Image (cartoon, rainbow, N blue to C red):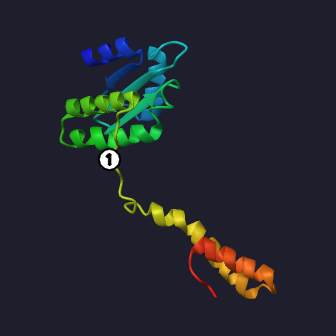
Amino acid sequence: EQKLIRYSDTTSTQIVVAITQDLCGGDIAMTATEWAHAWGIGQKGKDNGIFLLVSPSDRKLFIATGYGVEGTLTDALTRRIIETRILPSFRQGDYYAGIDAGVEAIFEVLSGEFQAEPRCSGEDGGTLFALLPILLFVAVMLIALQFLPITGIPRFALYLAAYLVIGFDIL
């Protein structure tokens, strides 16, 4: 608590942590946003508050950011903080350590010092999925080149463009 008060005094960004035993079936993101607005977290006019809501019995947590800090503390970064800093301690049953690690990571993000652990590029198949439209485009171009009744320089230009795009000889 004292750490959060000192941070608020030195930076004007207000960070509040709340633990609730039950969300009563509500959505944690909506609950966090509603509570943050109701409690007036952050400076008026700057909307620079951050609210960390934890519901252990529901096994949920959420970091809500005000408009004034969401350019620095993005949704993607809050997710990385939750996954890499908070959840490992929560899984061991140490909620205090998880919350403390999450708050420290938020401090690091806001000061520009946060270094997220790199993800493995193929761990979720995202790389192959991202390349799929390019591969499909190249396949369509190659098929079209075989059936187009183009002769002379225009056909050569298409072959050259295909060579430059895919990087190997198709002749």
- For residue 170, side relative to residue 3 (left or right): right
Give residue 155's quadrant in the image: bottom right
**Residue identifier under label 1:** 117
- Is there any visible trace of residue 24 in the rendered image? no
- Is there any visible trace of residue 103 in the rendered image? yes
- Identify which residue is drawn at 36% across, 21% down: 16
Q: Is residue 160 above or below residue 96?
A: below
- For residue 56, side relative to residue 30 (left or right): left
Q: Residue furthest front?
A: 153
Quadrant where the N terminus sits is top left
Image coordinates of residue 108 in percent, x first then y, are 34, 31
Q: Residues within 10 Å of mark 1 (few under 14, many from 20)?
A: few
- Identify which residue is drawn at 44% across, 15% down: 39
Image coordinates of residue 158 in percent, x first then y, are 72, 77
Q: Nearer the viewer, residue 28 or 126?
A: 126
Give residue 87's quadrant in the image: top left
Image coordinates of residue 162 in percent, x first then y, are 65, 76
Q: Amino acid at mark 1?
A: Glu
- For residue 79, side relative to residue 4 (left or right): right
Q: Is residue 131 above or below residue 138?
A: above
Q: Secondary structure at mark 1?
A: loop
Give residue 3's quadrant in the image: top left
- Identify which residue is drawn at 51% across, 31% down: 71
